[in-house]
Image: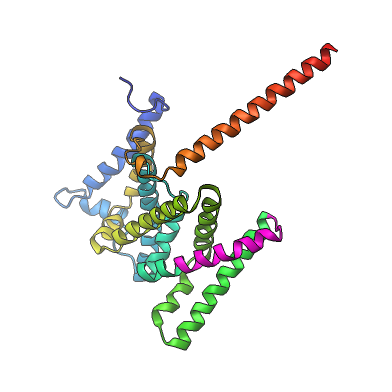
Amino acid sequence: MKLGKGNLSGGQKLILAMLIVGPLVLMVCKWSALPTSEFFMRGFSLANLSGDRESRVEYILSVPFGATLVVFFRLSLGIRLLGPFRSILLAVAFLITGILPGLAFLAVVIGIVLAIRPFVKAIRLPYFARVSVVLSVVALVMLIALLSSRWLGFESLSRVAYFPIIALCLMGEGFARILSREGLGSALWRGTMTAFVAVLITFMFQIDGFRKVFLYFPELLIFEIGFIIVIAEFLDFRLLRRLNLPAEEKSSSRHARKAKSLVARAHLREDSSKKGSTI
């Protein structure tokens, strides 16, 4: 019985095993009961950083963890998202703004992007200009929110100014694109699942003990790289793919029909060229 997809050679599997086992060995060497504990904790730990540096490192360490979770949801569970990066970017934003204010502001921005998208397409702006207009509108909305926080005295509203603009634009553009291609149901499903994964990443990294594990054992980053490969090669089960909306099947059949049409046209051109050469 073949294990996995068979994409990895023997040497590549050995490298993968080193990515998994190496960090685990390093973690064991930090065990307080071993004489190696002090040396490895001093040289391979980020536990004693200053406050600002520690916060910055936590954001850095949240990215590969988020990537691992996204790959697990997409490949092992088969849940469709708006893309591989959007949940991670949203999670970083939620760590800054808070989950509820971030979700509320995200919903507002997506609504605004959907509202201006028909006008932007109607005047036939090229892609780069269209995205730049959306980017500028999102920045304008953030400034209005910041000014509103001063007028209304809502300090929590001012935190949306720290929301990464690119994350907002990517979510709005991705939602609008899926809406036009696959319909409202698919867009809502994929958008909701993308936000759910982002909330899950944020929630876990708001647990103090969970963050400390990554600070004490930064070698887990290497482990996560190996584990992502393991998921892609050995755990690509897509167990919950039936929960995805039928739009996925419709989209696939549409692409299949398009491919068949292209093949049929190629055959017609080939037949025409043969007839022409015969004449």
Check the picture and name the quadrant holding the C terminus.
top right
Res 102 quadrant in image:
bottom left
**In percent of the image, x 42 and y 55: which residue is there?**
87
Q: Is residue 151 left or right of residue 38?
A: right
Residue 110, magenta (yes or no): yes
Q: Position of residue 46 (x, y in %)?
A: 32, 59
Q: Is residue 61 visible?
A: no
Q: Position of residue 35 (x, y in %)?
A: 17, 49
The residue furthest right is: 279
Q: Position of residue 226 (x, y in %)?
A: 36, 40
**Can you say whether 143 is above or below 20 in the image?**
below
The overriding secondary structure of the stretch rendered in magenta is: helix
**Can you say whether 250 is above or below 185 in the image?**
above
Res 5 quadrant in image:
top left
Q: How many marks?
A: 0
* Depth check, front residue: 110 or 142: 110
**In percent of the image, x 41 and y 62: which residue is there?**
92
* Depth check, front residue: 266 or 106: 266
The residue furthest left is: 33
Magenta segment range?
Answer: 106-126
Residue 100, magenta (yes or no): no
Q: Position of residue 164 (x, y in %)?
A: 49, 65
